[in-house]
Amino acid sequence: MNASDAQIRAAITQVAADWYAAHRAGPLAEADRAAFLAWLKSSPIHIEEYLGVAAMERTLRAASDDPALSVDALVEMARGDPTGGVVDLTGPQVRYEPVPVRPIRRYWRSLAATACVIMAGIVILWPMRDGQGVAAVKAYRTTHGEQGVWPLTDGSTLHVNTDTAVTVRFSAAERLLEVDHGQVAVEVAHRDGRPFRIHAGSTDAVAVGTKFDVYRRPDATLITVVAGQVAVSVGPFAPPRTAGAGPPGGLRVGAGRQVRVIAGVLPSASEPTDLRETTAWLERKIVFEQRPLGAVADEFNRYNAIPFTIDDPALRRLSISGTFNAADTDSFAAFLESLDGVRVERLPTRFNVLNSHGKTGSRARNT
């Protein structure tokens, strides 16, 4: 085999590794499945290399179970063996040498080392394809007032609210969603056998085949279950003990209930919650039922550039109810002006909500 043939073979190996990683990540879309079958049928070498990658991955798992053949030891062995035919998928230069006849034990040690290096190449290369595949990592960010919705490679759907930053990490063992700040809602694909974990500060949770909402605020983390169940716990962040296992010492939370974790303390039980209020943001709405005016104003301020400011503590406690478009500040200001004893001062940079005659405590509803 000359250098040109070796480079072609190495390129085919890389494509085979990509396809193998795609299959490990979950079911392929219809278009991707057709493309994969067309690629296989185009050459017997493609089939050979694809099966070779699968065999090497199995060899790697078997070797990892032997303490004497750890991944680090195998990589060092590969680097120190001048006669080994190791193909490095991550480097610009590709080298091929036939494996010489040698004792059986030495041959299998070299093969295991080769598997380690090739699988390391898969892990490095595959996430570059839009953050999808084995050990895939992808970040999702929204700015003030912005929302987004993205399909995930496992079939789940991720909704991201305003001012939110999350990272999705998919591996062969689990699906992990890390919430740095802000709010997300997830519809988890139940056909995927890997556990779906959520990590938000000190709060850790596991959900399978469910719909839930996570809101990581500066003062607390709220986890609301829309459908199914979620196991919630607090403490050091660590991988699950077994596939599908919930966190130790966790609290099972059912549909229509919410857990509020404050200062890393898990409550003794979940609480019932109004799902209409919790999920209204998915329709860019704000729904509030007998909520303090201050809390409602803060909710409007999450989505709009011109904020509502309320300095009067008694006015902030005023209980109100209503349903509004999250971006319609004018309608909300008009509603506040209709309340007895409330005056709204409209300035270029803010809405000042003032107590016009010192009377507070009334309850009002927007219709």
Image (tube, rainbow, N blue to C red):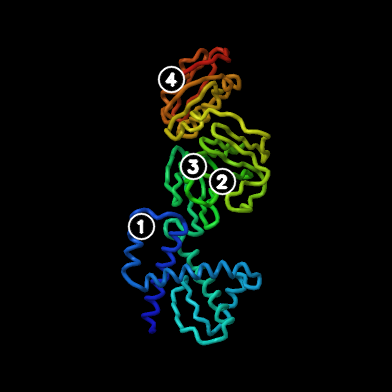
Three-letter amino acid code at disc 3? Val
- Residue 334: which numbered mark, if any? 4
Front disc: 1 or 2: 1
Q: Residues within 10 Å of mark 1 (few under 14, many from 20)?
A: few
- Residue 158: which numbered mark, if any? none
Closer-to-camera residue (323/122): 122
Q: Residues within 10 Å of mark 3 (few under 14, many from 20)?
A: many
Front disc: 4 or 1: 1
Three-letter amino acid code at disc 4? Ala
**Which residue corresponds to mark 3?**
186
- Mark closer to the chain start, 4 or 3: 3
The residue drawn where x is 61% and y is 71% is: 72
Q: Is there a contact, CB below 8 Å, between mark 3 and mark 2?
A: yes
- Mark closer to the chain start, 1 or 2: 1
Q: Position of residue 98 (x, y in %)?
A: 46, 84
- Residue 198: which numbered mark, if any? 2
Element at badge 2? strand
Element at badge 1? helix
The quarter holding residue 313 reads top right
- Mark closer to the chain start, 4 or 2: 2
- Specify the quadrant that holds the C terminus: top left
The quarter holding residue 14 reads bottom left
The residue drawn where x is 48% and y is 17% is: 365
**Which residue corresponds to mark 1?**
32
Count of labels in the image: 4
- Specify the quadrant that holds the N terminus: bottom left
How far separated are the C-alphas under marks 1 and 3? 24 Å
Three-letter amino acid code at disc 1? Asp
Three-letter amino acid code at disc 2? Ile
Q: Residues within 10 Å of mark 4 (few under 14, many from 20)?
A: few
